[in-house]
Image (cartoon, rainbow, N blue to C red):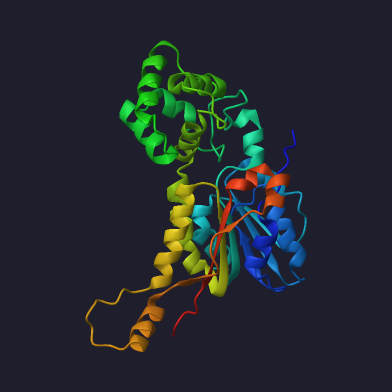
Amino acid sequence: MAFSHIPVLLNEVLEGMNIKEDGVYVDATFGRGGHSRKILDRLGPNGRLYGLDRDLTAVEAAKSITDPRFKITHSAFSNLKEVCESLGIEGKVDGILMDIGVSSPQIDDPTRGFSFEKDGPLDMRMDQSAKLDAKTIVNTYSKQDLAYIFKVYGEENFASKVASAIVREREKTPFETTLQLSEFIKRVIGGKPTPKHKATRCFQALRIAVNGELDELKKALESSIDVLADDGRLCVISFHSLEDRIVKTFIKDKSQGQKIPNGLPITFEEAEKMRLATAKVEPVGGAIKATPEEIAANVRSRSATLRICKRLKRLP
C-alpha cells in the first residue's frame, strides 16, 4: 500500500537551510522524501543531497529518486557522523535537516503498530531489522520500568496506575495488538471523554522507548557539529516538548561556549572573544511554528516546532 506524507514547515525549512546551488546537504530523516525533493529542486548540477533513514520502507521509497545528485543510506540519524565520514563529506555539509519522530506513513500503516486507533501488531519499530518491539516491552518489562517509560517519555499522569494494571492483565492475557492495548489503557485511566485519546501519551512513550529516540536525537545533534561546514545550517523539526527541549538546550549550550568565571579581571570584549573561541553554533531566529493555513491543510503540523542554528567558523 502507498501512504502519503505531507512535508511539514516546508517553506520555512527551505529558507532556513539557506540552500546554495553547489552545496552539499543531508536529509537525516528521509521519510518519503517530501523535503528532499524540494531541496533537489534548488540545487544546481554540482549540488549534492544525501538521505538517511532507519526505516527500510523509506529507503525502498527513496529508490524512486533517480537523480544522480542524490544518494540514500539505510541508517539511523544518530550515525550521521559515521555515514558522512564514509561518504567523504564530514565537515563539508552546508545544511542538515532532521525531521524528528514518527512519520505519517508509519502511523497510517496499521501493520507497523504505531497507531492506537487502527488495529495491528504491537510493533512500533522504525527500523524493521531491530530486535526490540513494543510487544516485548509491554509483556516483559517490570512495573517500575513501565511506569518510568510512561511518566518520563509520555509525561503520563496515570503512569503508575497504567503500569500496574498492564502487569496484572498480561498474566491472564498477553498483549498482542494495538487496539487491545489502547482500549485497555482507556478503561484503566477512565474519566470523561477527552479530545485526545487517553492512550496517546502511553503510545508515544512506548514508541520512544522502542526506538531509543531521545538518545538518538542527542547523538545526532552532537554529530552535526563535526559534520557541518563553516556557516552550515542545522534545521530540526520536533513534535513534542521532550524533543524540542533537547534541541533548544543543545543550541543554547553550543552557542554559549566556555563559561567565564565571575570576577575575572577581563574586559567584556576579552570575555566575548573567549566565548566565541569555544562556541560552536549560533541560533538563527527562534522557534518557528506552522501557520494557520498549513495547519488547516495538514493537521499533523500543529505540534511541529522548527529550530535553526548556524555552525560558527572554526578558528585556526
Q: Quadrant of the N terminus?
A: top right
Asked if 92 appears above or below 266 in the picture, the reply is above
Q: Give residue 232's quadrant in the image.
A: bottom right
| Front one among 209 and 244 | 244
Whether residue 103 can be seen here: yes
Q: Give residue 119's quadrant in the image.
A: top right
| Front one among 70 and 12 | 12
Asked if 229 appears above or below 106 in the picture, the reply is below
Asked if 275 appears above or below 303 in the picture, the reply is below
Q: Residue at x 62, y 36 (%)?
A: 107
Name the spot of residue 310 as percent of width and height, x first: 53, 71
Name the spot of residue 158 as percent of width and height, x first: 39, 29
Q: Residue at x 47, y 59 (%)?
A: 221
Name the spot of residue 177 as percent of width and height, x first: 54, 21
Q: Give residue 55's quadrant in the image.
A: top right
Whether residue 91 can be seen here: no
Name the spot of residue 183 as percent of width and height, x first: 52, 20
